[in-house]
Amino acid sequence: MVNIKNSKYNYFNTVWIVFFILLIAYAIYILIKSPELTLGIKPHTEDIVPYVSFRMIVGLYFFIAVFNIKRIKNNILWLGLIIVVGLVSRIILIPSQPVLEDDYYRYLWDGAVTAHGYNPYVYSPKATMDVTNGDVPEELRDLANESGQTVKNINHPHIRTIYPILSQIVFAAAYFISPWELWAWKVLLLLFDIILLLVLFKTLKELKLPLLFIVFYWLNPIVIHEFFNAAHMDLLALLFVSLSLYLSIKNKTWFAIVVLAFAVGFKLWPVVLLPLLLRNFWQNKKLLLKFISVFAGLVFVLFIPVLLSRLDNTLGFIKYAGEWINNAAIYTMIQWFIQETISFLHISVGCLSCISRWGIFIIYLFIGAIILRKTHQDKLQFFYKALLIVAVLYLISPTQFPWYYTWMVPLLAVRPKASLLLYPLLLPLYQLNYLSDYIIYIEHLPILILFLLELKGVIWKGHYIYLQNENSNKIITA
């Protein structure tokens, strides 16, 4: 019997070791192949398919490994391996060129504009390249010329930036470290990520959960690729969201509210967590009003530079809210249903997108009300509700970019959900969306179905967590 038990542990240990090797091998592969897979090169399908396939294989092994996390020992050796493998993978990717992504050009440009003391919300990149536009300061024209291909490669150059002011400050910091260099930006991302790792460790300790649960975030292939190859900026907000939630469970609500406001200063979406932070204060109207007033006041101050610019359809925030749609399965289905209903009823509608977005907004408010209808009874339930709020936001959003998935990953380190941990297997298909309109459904619908079944307890019966005590690391269903 002992031999059988040891052989089982050896098997699962091997699975984890293979995953470690695959993850580092993938980082090396991207480092070598990324110059051939940039948007500027315009790679062909036969070049993209092997890249996507490799990502899916790594995602599959990630799922197999973390789903069997209970099979490895909760000790310092395994924790050390996890941290080292995650850190090495990140460092390898810092010199790599972003594969099929170009958002970073906007970051580098915004950082230069901000570093030179200009409001980044006033002039679009296109305006600075237009020699006939007499409103643009000469220094900005010179900056555009100095940037070389950076300003020319910005996507949607006629749109003024969408990134809030605290993000702009970090972009500017990268510019001061080394102008126009992507590695400087990635080094700052690594710094934020290491601090986030420490916050998650503190959170796991506070909740008496195994530190091994850090693997759900630290070795998540989507996190590693989207931040350290594609260089997306969403990591900045994740740190402050995670810190805010940690402060909340430590009963430091005032600090939690302030930090959440700073998170909104990096990216708008964290505002959806404000009702959760305030849920247990709903009966205390006076205190609730104070919390909301401080939060709203801080956010208002942070968005003064935006308000001082032109608030029209060329501003990224307005353009994004009104029209943006990408890689969205559920939203596309809802929009199709609304369109067919309108057509069947012979109703004339001037803005189908407006109706669809308001419909999604109302659905989200309804689901949020259900999630928050009762106060959370303990800290684990608090994080579970936070995960549901963010997960539903992603699942029904008009934009389901792969890097938006990272919003929920730190929460998965506390409340792992098998359905959402399967995303690293399917999200790489995003890069093949141009082959068929149906690929978005392959990416998202299996996850949605599993997510709903998980909520009903039909499969996996909830969230597998350790019941940690002095004598055992028993797995229980919570």
Image (cartoon, helix red, strand yellow):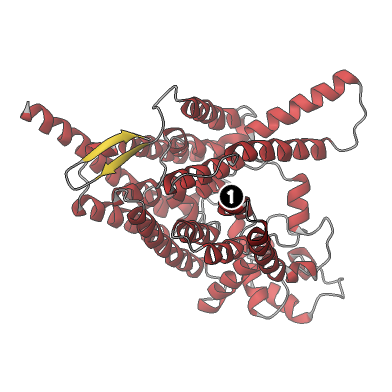
Residue that badge 1 annotates: 279
Residue farthest along the top direction in this orientation: 344
Q: Nearer the viewer, residue 159 or 194?
A: 194
Please report the residue visible at 26 percent of the width from the left and 41 percent of the height from the top.
16
Q: Where in the figure is residue 176, as x and y percent of width and height?
A: 55, 79
Along the line of sight, the residue nearer the viewer: 239 or 276: 276
SS at mark 1 in the image = helix
Q: Is residue 299 visible?
A: yes
- Figure check: 348 above or below 256: above
- Which residue is at a point 66% across and 75% down the rendered structure image? 114
409 sits left or right of 24 in the view? right
Split into 4 quadrants, where in the image is the C terminus? top left
Residue 171: percent from the left, percent from the top? 58, 69
Q: Residue at x 63, y 78 (%)?
A: 115
Q: Quadrant of the N terminus?
A: top left
Locate residue 430, reporting x and y percent: 56, 38
Task: Inspect the image, locate mark 1, and give the three-letter code of the amino acid beneath it.
Answer: Arg
Relative height, residue 78 to residue 119 (above, below): above
Quadrant housing residue 196: bottom left
Q: Quadrant of residue 361?
A: top right
